[in-house]
Amino acid sequence: ETRFTINDDTDITYDKTQYAGAVTLRSQNTLNANGATLQVPDYITACGKKYAVVAIGTPNQGTGASELALDNVSSIFGKGVEQKYDFSVKLGKNVKVIYGSAFKDQPHLTRLTLNSALEKVHYRAFYNCKISNDLIFSHGLKHVQAEAFVGNQFTNMLVPSSTTSFMMNSINKCNNLQELIYNSASNLASYNT
C-alpha cells in the first residue's frame, strides 16, 4: 500500500505553486510489470487539500542515526522485499530529499530520472541498485552521503558546484563509471580504497 506522512501542515509554496503543507512518500506497493515506472507525484490531495511530496523514505534516516543502525532499515517497498521486474523511478518536481535506504537492495531499479529540486541523497539511498542511465544533478544539490549509490551501473555523473558535501565512497563499486564531473573539487570527501 502506498503511504504518505504529513511533515508540515502549514502553507508552503514550491515552484510558484501554493500547497497546504508537505508530505513524505513512506511506502509503496510492489510494481508488477517489467519496465514499470514509479512516478513519484508532485503532490497528493488529502481532505481536500494539496500537499507537496518533498521526500521519499523514512524521515530522519541518516540524520543522527548511526550507519550501523541504518543497515536494518527497509526500502519503501518493505523489509526484504525486492522488486521482481526491471523498473525506473521518476522524481516528482518537489522532491528535495531521498532518505537513507529508500531504494536499498533493489537490483531491478535500472533508471532514475532526477528533478531540479533535489538537495540531499542520504546514506545508502540507492545502495545495490543497477541504475544505468547517466546521473546529472541540477544546481541546488547540497549533499550526497556515504554509500548512496554503491554498486550502480551508470557511466557518467555530474555533481554541481552547489554541492557542499559529496562522500566519495558514495560511488564505490560503480564499476562502469567512466567520468565523474565535480564542479567544486574542494568539497570532495576523501576515503581509503
Image (tube, grey):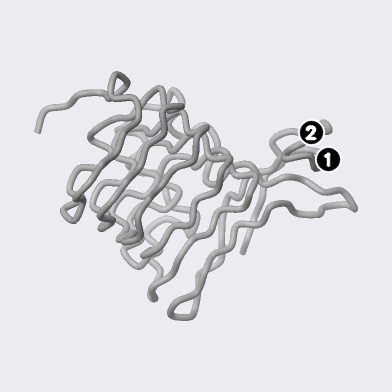
Q: Is residue 143 above or below residue 157?
A: above
Observer-nearest residue: 62 or 126? Answer: 126
Element marked by disc 2:
strand
Observer-nearest residue: 49 or 144? Answer: 144
- The type of residue carrying mark 1 is Gln
Q: Is residue 162 left or right of residue 27?
A: left
* Residue that lies at the very extreme toward the left in this rendered image: 193
Percent x, y of residue 143: 42, 29
Percent x, y of residue 188: 28, 25
Query: Label 1: few (<14), some or many (≥20) within 10 Å?
Result: few
Mark 2 and mark 1: Cα distance apart in space? 6 Å
The numbered mark, 2 or 1, whose residue comes first in the sequence reads 2
* Residue that lies at the very extreme toward the right in this rendered image: 48
Q: Which quarter of the rendering shows the N terminus?
A: bottom right
Observer-nearest residue: 153 or 53? Answer: 153
Residue where numbered disc 1 is placed: 18
Element marked by disc 1:
strand
Percent x, y of residue 178: 19, 50
Query: Label 2: few (<14), some or many (≥20) within 10 Å?
Result: some
Q: Is residue 147 above or below residue 30?
A: above
Observer-nearest residue: 56 or 75? Answer: 56
* Residue that lies at the very extreme toward the top in this rendered image: 186
Which residue is painted at 37% across and 24% down in the image? 165
Residue where numbered disc 2 is placed: 12
- The type of residue carrying mark 2 is Ile
Looking at the rendering, which quadrant does residue 3 occupy? bottom right
Which residue is painted at 18% across and 56% down in the image? 176
Q: Is residue 57 left or right of residue 129?
A: right
Which residue is painted at 29% across and 30% down in the image? 167
Q: Quick check: marks 2 and 1 in contact, CB under 8 Å?
A: yes
